[in-house]
Image: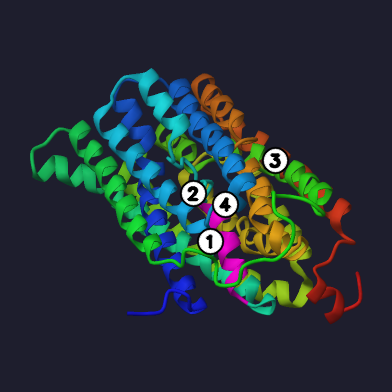
Amino acid sequence: MSDTRDPASVVRRLLVAKALRGFADGFVSLLLPVYLLQLGFSSLQVGLVATGTLLGSGVLTLVVGLQSWRFHLRTWLLASAALMAATGIGFTVVTQFWPLLLIAVVGTLNPSAGDVSVFLPLEQALLSQVVENRRRTAQMARYSLVGTLSGAVGSLAAALPTLAASRAGISGTAALQGMFALYALLAVAAGAVYRGLPAAPVATASGPKGGLQTARKRVYLLAALFSLDAFGGGFVVQSLVALWLYQRFDLAVATAGAIFFWTGVLTAVSYLVAARIADRFGLLNTMVFTHLPSSVCLLLIPFMDTLGPVLVLLFIRSALSQMDVPTRSSYVMAIVPPAERAAAASVTSVPRSLAAAASPMLAGYLLGVSPFGWAFIAGGVAKIAYDLLLLGTFRKVRPPEEATARPPA
């Protein structure tokens, strides 16, 4: 048996758990709107459920992040896995709108292609404690790579309910409910992986307890900027992009799954490229100058009349838009003291769900009144504004390893 206090063993366990959760998120993000529409819900109600998942995740992530110093990170991860299992069971057995909305708010469902759950800051904080600073960005890229590739495979699994309904003779609703039961089982498996983590971090951070202390102002400013990016991203979460494709081009679920599989592969490859670019040009420059062109792609998508150009733009965006994920995580971990990293990861991750909570509802409304794709326009504008503000505000704030490696830009 491997030594769970060995940093390499901790990293492996975090990657395995990330893969299990990514696979689950991959098929749930595509099947969630299909399931809700099958139950007779409107586009607006689908948007409300997506909003509920993001809102609840944001509040939970904030609370856990700020209180993470009170308990071992393993304890928080095990509790989160139990909540994930309960969420899957809830969506398996409940079919009424208001109870489902409540489960969405308090649970862990993820309507997005990225990880916007309570797990993220906990895993990032633990990962940053067990790897050396010079390898932090590469490990964050590897962490994101595993999650995105497993999410891409999960997108392909979204075709399973259709196959089950046609070959096993069960109803479409029952087949979809079976996938939410699978979601719960994957949560149990992730919990088993977390149990093998050390009770305390391998490298316990020294410093003041109680969350953010010295880095509070810097972290809050980053959180405000990330909230703008998250608000824009909420207009184009994967569930609602899939819904737009279903409505605009009458796309089959299996076809959508294949499309999002390849967008996931492109995103995964981009993480590795991002780590290399960041080594040469810096974390902040990589975050901004890869993100800007991807936002322009969002602005162009609604003006495409056929599926082909839309797919080209989606693929280009997928190859660029998430390069800021490992670099952003590494940047936040680099510019705050080790003792405050869990709280910083939480506070800067919360906007990805909390500030994005309103936009899926607005996007659902826009989809209900017009097939044009106004949600893409709104998302693109918000994200471009974020890029420019981030560059202008933090261009002089450099991680210690960058400041010593090259002169300021």
Per the image, the residue denoted by label 1 is 267
Looking at marks 2 and 3 on the same chain, the residue that comes earlier in the sequence is marked by: 2
Looking at marks 4 and 3 on the same chain, the residue that comes earlier in the sequence is marked by: 3
Q: Nearer the viewer, mark 1 or mark 2?
A: 2
Per the image, the residue denoted by label 4 is 313
The question of residue 121 being in magenta is answered with yes
Magenta residues, start to end: 119-131
Per the image, the residue denoted by label 2 is 113
x then y, percent, for residue 358: 60, 28
* Residue under the point 44% across and 60% down: 18
Mark 4 touches mark 3? (CB < 8 Å): no
The quarter holding residue 409 reads bottom right
Q: Please rate how many residues cluster around mark 2, counting C-alpha atoms within 10 Å: few if below 14, some from 14 to 19, many from 20.
A: many
The one nearer the camera, 38 or 341, is: 341
Q: Nearer the viewer, mark 1 or mark 3?
A: 3
The one nearer the camera, 95 or 385, is: 95
Q: Is mark 1 on a helix, strand or loop?
A: helix
Looking at marks 2 and 4 on the same chain, the residue that comes earlier in the sequence is marked by: 2
